[in-house]
Image (cartoon, helix red, strand yellow):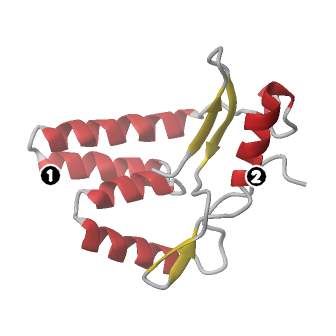
Amino acid sequence: MPSAVWIDESGRVLRIDEGTYAAKHEISGFEFGREDYAPLLRDWVKHGASSRYVADPAQIRPRDAQASQADAAFKLGVHFFKAGNLPKANQYWEQAQRGNADSWNYHRQDWTFDGDDAARANWAARVQQRTGAAYYQPIAGLD
C-alpha cells in the first residue's frame, strides 16, 4: 500500500496519513503518484527533527469513530477471507468501504483479492468516476 508514516528513533509519529507513491506511475492510461513527496523525505533524513516538514503534533489528527469502525470492519473482512468465508468477508469489506468511502486503501485492498486484472479494472473505473478530484490529498506543510 502506498502510504507514508514518519516515525523517529524514539517511536514518535512525525507525519502520518499521506497515501503516496514517491514517483509518478501509469497504469491503463491513468497517471498516479507524485513527485513532491520524495524531497520532503530527503529533507527529513538530512535534518531529522529540525526538518521543516516534521508535522506539528496538533496537525496529526486522531481517527474519528466512523473511520475506526471502518478499519475494524475491514480487518474482520480479512479474517473471514482467510477463514474461507468469502460472503462474510465481502459483507465486512463493503461495510468498511461505506464507512470510509474516501479511503482508497479499503477499495484497493479489497480489489487485490480479485486478482491483478480485476483490481486494475476496478481501480481504473473508480479513478474515472473522480473527474476533477485529486487522487491524493495535498501534502500538509508544503508552501
Q: Which residue is mark 2?
A: 39
Tell me: 87 left or right of 140.
left
**Where is 102 relative to 30, above or below?**
above
Q: Which residue is mark 1?
A: 87
Q: Position of residue 48 (x, y in %)?
A: 78, 29
Q: Residue at x 49, y 34 (%)?
A: 68
Q: Position of residue 13 (x, y in %)?
A: 66, 26
Q: Residue at x 34, y 77 (%)?
A: 121
Residue 119 visible, this angle: yes
Could you tell which of marks 1 and 2 lies nearer the N-terminus?
A: 2
Which is in the foreground here, disc 1 or disc 2? 2
Which quadrant of the view contains residue 6?
Answer: top right
User: 110 or 66, which is in the foreground?
Assistant: 110
User: 51 or 113, which is in the foreground?
Assistant: 51
For label 1, count other residues whose C-alpha is less than 10 Å away and answer few (under 14), some (14-19) or many (20+).
few
Q: Position of residue 59 (x, y in %)?
A: 78, 35
Which quadrant of the view contains residue 17?
Answer: top right
Q: Residue at x 39, y 47 (%)?
A: 96
User: 9 or 1, which is in the foreground?
Assistant: 9
Which residue, as the protein is rendered here, is positioned at the far front?
Answer: 46
* Callout 1 secondary element: helix
**Where is 29 relative to 109, above or below?**
below
Q: Amino acid at mark 1?
A: Pro
User: 99 or 129, which is in the foreground?
Assistant: 129
Report, in whole angstroms, how far the alpha carbon at label 1 lies from the one at label 2.
44 Å
**Where is 12 relative to 122, above or below?**
above
* Callout 2 secondary element: helix
Which quadrant of the view contains residue 119?
Answer: bottom left
Q: Amino acid at mark 2?
A: Pro
Residue 129 visible, this angle: no
